[in-house]
Image (cartoon, coloured by chain):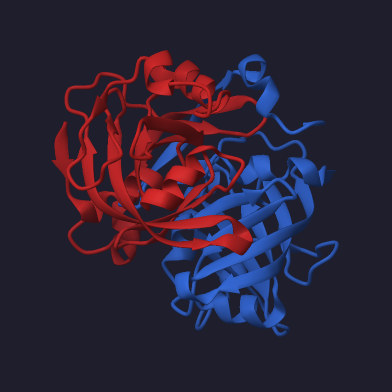
Chain colours: A red, B blue
């Protein structure tokens, strides 16, 4: 893995991929699958929608830290499997053969197999909408990974794989944050 | 256009496409491009991140209504163009040759050229994070459109087109809302 400039970290979440959210509650690592995420600021800040119905929410609330990891399409069955069971009774890192790597700032683990990992701290929990606002504090990119396509959940059990990339940098010049 | 079951409307936003947000401030139609969106509830409720820096925010705050329209990849140059100018001095429906169609519930217009249109009412504006929470009240799908691939903004001026769709309905059976 190599360090990614923090100012670019929002480009990992803006396209809307399914992500894994890794936590460590002080005793053990856990991970959940979510696709309800958005960028809220270039600083970068992200929002995720989650609540009591996700076991990971307890760790998120208690430790105020997590890692958002972006899986590639070759991990899709793991991603779906992770979403279909609970950390309450399952060691998901063991069950899905994920390799935890120590993060730089937070106690939650990075996931070695993923395309990218973003270390985050909780800024705020907007309880009435189950929205958690996160501040990214470090970001890491996998190096030498062959499959780099992310996947997008439709929500009905189907997933859309990244297709080709179109360049509109010139048209968008005025809207791209400086230095990106 | 044909009506879409409201309970399925979240499947339009969950994959994270770039969207157009249409408003009508009581005098004229306007439209902006955003990619900072997420689902927050199956009811369906959505969150978008926006604020004073977007001219449309005034109309959104005043009327508490908008239409979220999903453009297809054949509209990408329009989508980028719409994001690069302001309704403060531009009639974007005219400039980008968008066809406004009366919506069923809200006063903001549907956009005929798009893949889908979701009529929304503002539930709440979380000012400290510039998050607007929306309740979808009606949804419409284009009928007979040939190009149905959406696009995903990376944020650096490049865009990822929808690729192939993978089916994991069986694996996800327990997680799919009933009736979907």
Percent x, y for residue B59? 63, 79
Q: Quadrant of residue A31?
A: top left
Q: Is residue A41 above or below residue A68?
A: below
Q: Quadrant of the C terminus of chain B?
A: top right
Count of numbered circles on the image:
0
Left of B25 or right of it: where is B31?
Answer: left
Percent x, y for residue B176? 70, 29
Outermost residue toward the front in this view: A27
Percent x, y for residue A95? 43, 14
Residue sitting at x 45%, y 52%: A61
Left of A103 or right of it: where is A161?
Answer: right
Outermost residue toward the left in this view: A2
Q: Is residue B33 above or below residue A56?
A: below
Q: Is residue B81 above or below residue A169?
A: below
Residue sitting at x 80%, y 47%: B6
- Camera-side residue: A123 or B126? A123
Residue sitting at x 37%, y 47%: B154
- Camera-side residue: B119 or A64? A64
Residue sitting at x 48%, y 39%: A56
Percent x, y for residue A125? 49, 60
- Camera-side residue: A114 or A106? A106
User: Can residue A111 be spotted in the picture?
Assistant: yes
User: Can residue B1 be spotted in the picture?
Assistant: no
């Amino acid at each position: 893995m190599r360090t990614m400039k923090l100012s670019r970290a929002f480009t990992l979440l803006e396209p809307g991929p399914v992500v894994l959210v890794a936590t460590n509650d002080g005793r053990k690592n856990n991970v959940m699958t979510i696709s309800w995420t958005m960028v809220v600021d270039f600083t970068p800040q992200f929002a995720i929608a989650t609540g009591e119905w996700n076991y990971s929410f307890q760790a998120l609330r208690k430790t105020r830290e997590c890692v958002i990891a972006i899986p590639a399409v070759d991990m899709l069955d793991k991603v779906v499997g992770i979403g279909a069971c609970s950390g309450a009774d399952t060691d998901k890192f063991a069950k899905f053969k994920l390799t935890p790597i120590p993060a730089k700032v937070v106690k939650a683990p990075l996931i070695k197999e993923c395309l990218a990992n973003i270390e985050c701290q909780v800024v705020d929990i907007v309880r009435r909408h189950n929205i958690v606002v996160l501040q990214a504090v470090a970001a890491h990119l996998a190096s030498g990974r062959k499959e780099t396509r992310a996947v997008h959940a439709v929500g009905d059990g189907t997933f859309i794989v990244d297709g080709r990339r179109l360049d509109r940098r010139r048209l968008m010049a005025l809207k791209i944050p400086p230095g990106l």
